[in-house]
Image (cartoon, grey):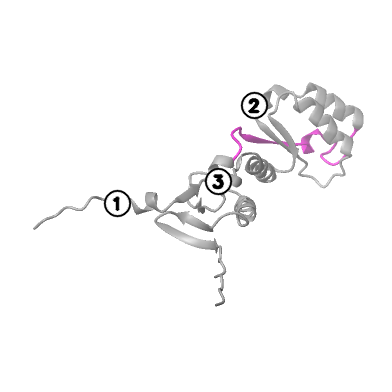
Amino acid sequence: MDIQQPIVNKVAQSGLITLNLEDFLPKDPIVALDIKPFLFRELLLKEKDFRKAMKEQDWTQYEGKNLAVFCSSDAIIPMWAYMLIATYAESHASFVGFGDKNEILRLLTHQNIHQHLDVEGLKEKKVILKGCGEKPIPASAYLEVSRLLKPVVLSLMYGEACSTVPIYKIRKQKEKTRT
């Protein structure tokens, strides 16, 4: 006798929820602005020259982009210089922050996690943080999501539904009854 059994999707029935951290990456591209070329001999900030250079800079090139502002030389940059850059860039860039592209990626990813991760909606759920993806995810994002979810989820895993690495599982204490 050849009795065909229906195919059962055990993953779908398991109640596992997969979170793809790529969903929390910034949507707009991140571009860098190194202020080193705006310095005298790439080491000294001359206020008058710097102000003129900032006024003449084509800020429209940062339209709809996240701007990472930094200085690659060992020059001492006064804080007002970064403030001046922000006043010019903020009306064009989606975001303006201090640091290299990786630092801004980490910062914006963390902001997105805090704004869009529905922690309460994952209460008492079994959650998998997706492992492989098309875009690199900052390690700090996995740390932050794990920190936020541990107090509320039943279990936290890493990988794919068919092959997970267990990270955390709530241990319920057995109630002892006395007779």
x and y percent of residue 83 in the render? Answer: 84, 33
Q: Which residue is mark 2?
A: 64
Residue sitting at 86 percent across and 30 percent down? 50
- Callout 2: few (<14), some (14-19), or many (20+) C-alpha neighbours within 10 Å? some
Residue placed most toward the observer, 145 or 173: 173
* Residue 166 within the segment the image draws in magenta: no
Residue sitting at 52 percent across and 44 percent down? 135
Residue placed most toward the observer, 86 or 77: 86
x and y percent of residue 57 in the render? Answer: 76, 24
x and y percent of residue 156 in the render? Answer: 53, 57
Q: Which amino acid type is shown beneath numbered disc 1?
A: Val
Residue contact at pointers 1 and 2, CB within 8 angstroms: no
| Mark pair 1, 2: CA separation | 46 Å
Q: Which amino acid type is shown beneath numbered disc 3?
A: Leu
> Which quadrant is the N terminus positioned in?
bottom left
Q: Which residue is mark 1?
A: 8
Mark 3 vs mark 1: in front:
1
* Residue 30 within the segment the image draws in magenta: yes
- Residue 134 sits above or below residue 151 on the image: above
Q: Which amino acid type is shown beneath numbered disc 2?
A: Gly
